[in-house]
Amino acid sequence: SHVTYHGRTPFEDDAASGHDRLLLRLWLSMPNNRPLPADHEVLWRSVEPGRVRGGIQQGTA
């Protein structure tokens, strides 16, 4: 998500139906990722392209 940041309209829970929002976020760590800006090194340690940084790593068959 370093390339596309998310935008969405505000969500309002429907108190009458008893349904509340459940937000799940999935972060995939792909082996063919792009380089990150140098100041991201504090958080991710490695900013080079192709480095796996956090997230759920892609499985191998």
Image (cartoon, helix red, strand yellow):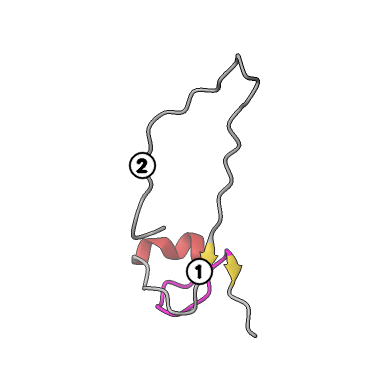
Q: Nearer the viewer, mark 1 or mark 2?
A: 2
Q: Could you tell me the amino acid type at mark 2? A: Gly
Q: Could you tell me the amino acid type at mark 1? A: Arg
* Magenta segment, prevailing SS (helix, strand or loop): loop
Residue 60 in percent (x, y) is at: 63, 83
- The number of callouts visible is 2
Could you tell me which residue is drawn at 36 percent across and 42 percent down? 7
Residue 20 within the segment the image draws in magenta: no
Q: Which mark is residue 11?
A: none
Q: Dividing the image into 4 quarters, which one contains the N terminus?
A: bottom left
**Based on the displayed image, in which of its 4 quarters is residue 10 positioned?**
top left
Q: Dividing the image into 4 quarters, which one contains the C terminus?
A: bottom right
Task: Report the residue marked by disc 1.
Answer: 45
15 sits to left or right of 2: right
Task: Report the residue marked by disc 2.
Answer: 7
Q: Residues within 10 Å of mark 1 (few under 14, many from 20)?
A: few
Residue 39 in percent (x, y) is at: 37, 61
**Based on the displayed image, in which of its 4 quarters is residue 59 positioned?**
bottom right
58 sits to left or right of 5: right
